[in-house]
Amino acid sequence: MKTYLLVIILCVLFYSCSENKKRCYSSFTYFKGNIRYSYYLKFTSSDTVYFYDRYPFGKKGTYYFLLDEITRNELDKIVWKVNL
């Protein structure tokens, strides 16, 4: 029983000590607009991107989509280059 408990504790400790990669940003917002369109893209440190369409004469709305890991890594590289 003691060995079983020790194995569980060790597994939990090793699993909880795994190193998470830190992002260089918590979130950032990109805005683009002119006479024909206007929108915001908000990138979060997780894999979610929010799209806010605010064009006054069309459909307005807030949408979101998820990035896959490859695209998220490419975005991180671009932000690192801009920060340098």
Image (tube, grey):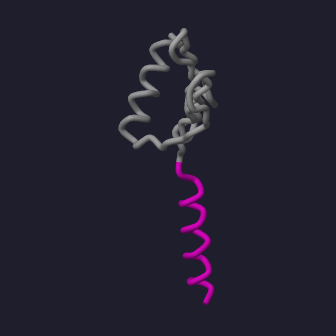
**Residue 11, x across and y down, in percent:** 54, 68
Q: For residue 58, which quarter of the picture? A: top right
Whether residue 25 is situated above or below residue 4 in the rendered picture = above
Left or right: residue 82 versus residue 52 is: left
The percent position of residue 55, horizontal first and vertical second, equals 59, 22
The stretch drawn in magenta includes residue 16 = yes
Residues drawn in magenta = 1-18
| 71 shown above or below 5 | above
The location of residue 66, given as percent across then percent down, is 48, 43
At 56% from the left and 18% from the top, the residue drawn is 38
**For the view shown, which residue lies furthest in the bottom direction?**
1
Tell me where residue 9 appears, x and y as whole percent: 61, 71
Name the side, left or right, on which 59 lies relative to 72. Answer: right
Taking the spot 49% from the left edge, 12% from the top edge, the residue there is 82
Task: Kindly report the secondary structure that dominates the magenta region of the rendered protein.
Answer: helix
**Does the magenta segment cover residue 48?**
no
Up-down: is 50 above or below 29?
below
Camera-side residue of 38 and 83: 38
| In-front residue for pair 17/35 | 35
Q: Residue at x 36, y 38 (%)?
A: 70
Residue at the farthest left position: 70
Figure quadrant of residue 1 = bottom right
